[in-house]
Image (cartoon, rainbow, N blue to C red):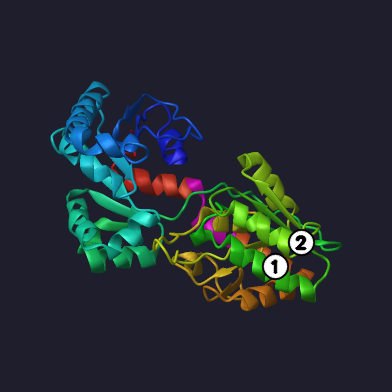
Amino acid sequence: MRRHANDLLPGRTCAIGERMAEPPAWSPEGPTLLLYGGLERPGRIASKVLDRAFMANRDVRALRSFLAEHRVRAMLVDFLDGFLRYMPAVQGARVRWYSFGHGFDVSRRLDEPRWLARYRAHGQAEGVFVRADCIRERLVARVGLDPKRVHVVRGGIDVPDAPLPHPADGEVRVLAVGRFMAKKGPLQTLAAFRVALERVPDLRLEMIGDGPLMAQSEQYVHEKGLEDRVTLRGAQPPEEVQRALASAHIFVQHSRRDPVTGDEEGLPASITEAMAAALPVVSTRHAGIPEAVREGEEGYLVEEGDVRGMAERIARLARDASARQEMGESGWRRAREMFRWEQEREALLSLMRLEGA
């Protein structure tokens, strides 16, 4: 979303979002409208029923006025669910709009009949974009969207002009980057690393990210006596993530379907960024990941929940520096071919009929 807001059409883009209880991680560079809607969720139980209709109408009026003031020609709507409450403003504004599905909105939501019914409104969009073929097929089959209007737009990342070098000798560093939440599988990643460490003692795991499962992850590290082999660094700025990618040897992520909420990945940017950094990937056959990582070429994939299988692949790569290099370079080439931001930008501008803007 940050890239869409700031880099798709720099200087020609407005941003619209909802006010949230948490401070923003970044700020759009263009004119911005913050709507009330996001504050309905946390801490407003008593007043929600009374003021929802009033505030929704106010938001619709504010959005309609904002679109007119800035002469908006086209809208890119990130996430399919939150936008629906504001559709009346867009329908009367003569604005072409396009929807972009990402994760929870194209996984768990599709298990709920009421959301399936509401999602049919996206048939009015000029186009619907998703990150992976499997998600496109899901929307076409389950929502009934016109397949001609649902397009796969691969995630846009920065890919260096040459594969990054990684040391072949010494301690093997395993890296995981992502929110500490169920669908990212941080506890499964830790369990797999622990088993791999029994087979290859000269291993170290670094995990970057924060989230609701951080406390459980810290407890696991302490209980299993892994403090000298596992570092939980918390959330880090992008430049620090890039430094970690450059100094690692193997990237791991045990993506899975959240057993409680049903939330899933789309195609995680952390996976494609690791490929861009010429790291072999050990992950799961989950959502769009097999569309990026081919078994035995850019890394290894195991079934969701297969902790021992993941441990075996980590150990196998830890022992084989030449395989790490070959898979890493294959990942870099695939990232160059499929996942560069320049390619996503070109595709979006073409699909949104904005090439000359």
Q: Which residue is at a point 57% across and 53% down the rendered structure image?
A: 178
In this figure, which residue is indicated by the disc labeled 2? 226
For residue 43, above or below residue 144: above
Q: Which residue is at a point 67% across and 63% down the rendered structure image?
A: 328
- x, y percent for residue 147: 24, 63
The answer to whether residue 127 of the structure is visible from this angle is yes
Residue furthest to the left in view is: 92
Q: Residue 267 lies in magenta, yes or no? A: no
Q: Secondary structure at mark 1?
A: helix
Q: Secondary structure at mark 2?
A: loop
Q: Is residue 244 left or right of residue 354?
A: right
For residue 88, above or below residue 336: above
Q: Amino acid at mark 1?
A: Phe
Cα distance in 3D space between marks 1 and 2:
10 Å
The answer to which of 281 and 84 lies nearer the viewer is: 84
Q: Is residue 212 left or right of residue 116?
A: right
Q: Main secondary structure of the magenta part?
A: helix
Which contiguous range is marked in magenta?
333-341
Q: Which residue is at a point 19% across and 34% down the rendered structure image?
A: 50
Q: Quadrant of residue 167?
A: bottom right
- x, y percent for residue 340: 52, 50
Q: Is residue 266 left or right of residue 165?
A: left
**CB-based contact (under 8 Å), mark 1 and mark 2:** yes
The answer to whether residue 130 of the structure is visible from this angle is no
Q: Is residue 333 left or right of residue 325?
A: left
